Image (cartoon, coloured by chain):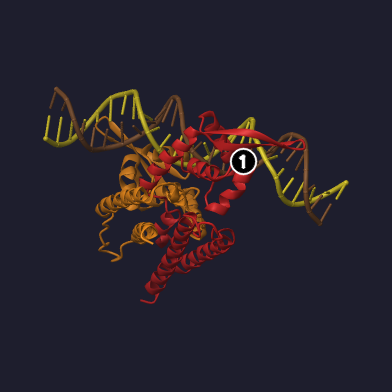
Chain colours: A orange, B red, C brown, D yellow
Amino acid sequence: MPNEHKLLLLGLLRQTDMHGYMLNAHLDATIPVTLKKPTAYHLLDVMEKDGWITHRNERTGKRTRKVYRLTEQGEAEYLTLLRHQLAAFTPGEYPGMVSICFLDSLPVPESIRLLKDRQSRIREYIAGFHHTSDHPVDPGTRHRGSAALAIDFIHRALKLEMTFLDDVVHTLQDSTNQ
Amino acid sequence: MPNEHKLLLLGLLRQTDMHGYMLNAHLDATIPVTLKKPTAYHLLDVMEKDGWITHRNERTGKRTRKVYRLTEQGEAEYLTLLRHQLAAFTPGEYPGMVSICFLDSLPVPESIRLLKDRQSRIREYIAGFHHTSDHPVDPGTRHRGSAALAIDFIHRALKLEMTFLDDVVHTLQDSTNQ
DNA sequence: TTTTCCATGTAACTCGTTACATGATTTC
DNA sequence: GAAATCATGTAACGAGTTACATGGAAAA
């Protein structure tokens, strides 16, 4: 999905002005996305050069930080990106599925062991997930924001992956006691 | 997922020796994966330099093609990659979810329209999918190969995305007639 | 006072894409 | 004889990562 990271940064900046470090801190809390710190700083530079955002310097002692704010153009770009990405569909990569294609290259017991390893890694991931994604209900609007919808989807996707792996393991087990 | 494309190429070459063009043709038929022609040729070069595969030239008239074959080292690397990737978990990107986070920036009717656009694109994708992924049952072993499992997962994932979007649309509709 | 956190980056690298180039062969 | 397909690439670019660099401030 092109510019998905820009949309995320713009969307956060639209809510409140922020500096890069704070943005990075908010990223994981909003939605699990692989956007590393250097990349985020870089995107802020790019978007500033393009006139989508501007920054003012805030000083605390000798330390300064760049607090970014959306420009009018940035607001317009935000809405354009949002409309495009809401209507777009990008197939997705489904990482780890290639190895499933070649399951039969290994002895069945080993395959089962490896798949159960994967499952325990998924469980760990889900566990770390609940900590960061417990968004409180906004007392003003009394709804949780649409981010909760996205989080919910990811939960469902992870659950799907778990039950799929269960099915695969069972298929493998059946194939030995047939 | 690192080296997933290499694993795919090795896995196909392990079944039968092939030249690059044929590999590219088989890619989509095996599993839907975004691996473009130039990338595949490049990976073949790299893996040959690393001693994982070798090629012989086959001539038909003036046209030659490079038919690749796994080396012993390639076989070993294949198994190592396979074991690692079967046990590994890579979170996945869930493209299109960022835009869901900011749904409330647009008027509800427009959001609904855009999401339904996305759904129709997913439907098209699924339709084109059934054509390529009708793998015949192997008459010798009488099983469909593990690739069918991966295909099945992708089907389930796409269905999940559809019902998720249904849910979101319904949530939006309810929020107006509340 | 040493570690941890705050805050911003740079440089080199990996992986992959797009658009293009080339030429032979088969099909219409 | 023109168009599609077979077959292999190159060159330029883009997005993002990793590891590292820098320096101030707060906490242990």
* Residue at horizontal 31 percent and vertical 65 percent from the top: A143
- Closest to the observer: B130 or B19? B19
Image position, residue C1 (x, y; %): 14, 22
- Closest to the observer: B54 or B151? B54
* Residue at horizontal 42 percent and vertical 64 percent from the top: B160
Image position, residue B146 (x, y; %): 46, 54
Image position, residue C23 (x, y; %): 77, 35
| Residue at the farthest bottom position | B177
Does residue B75 show up?
yes
Quarter of the image containing the C terminus of chain B? bottom left
* Residue at horizontal 56 percent and vertical 60 percent from the top: B136
Image position, residue A134 (x, y; %): 26, 57
Q: Which residue is mark 1?
A: B20
Q: Residue B65 vs residue B111: left or right?
A: right
> With respect to residue A4, does B152 lie above or below?
below
Q: What residue type is disc 1 on?
A: Gly
Q: How many marks?
A: 1
- Closest to the observer: B157 or A64? B157
**Residue A54 position by quadrant:** top left
- Name the chain under label 1: B
Question: Mark 1 packing: few (<14 Cα in 10 Å), some, or many (20+)?
Answer: some
Q: Residue A26 vs residue A100: left or right?
A: left
> With respect to residue B178, does A131 lie above or below?
above
Does residue A71 show up?
no
Secondary structure of the residue carrying tag 1 is helix
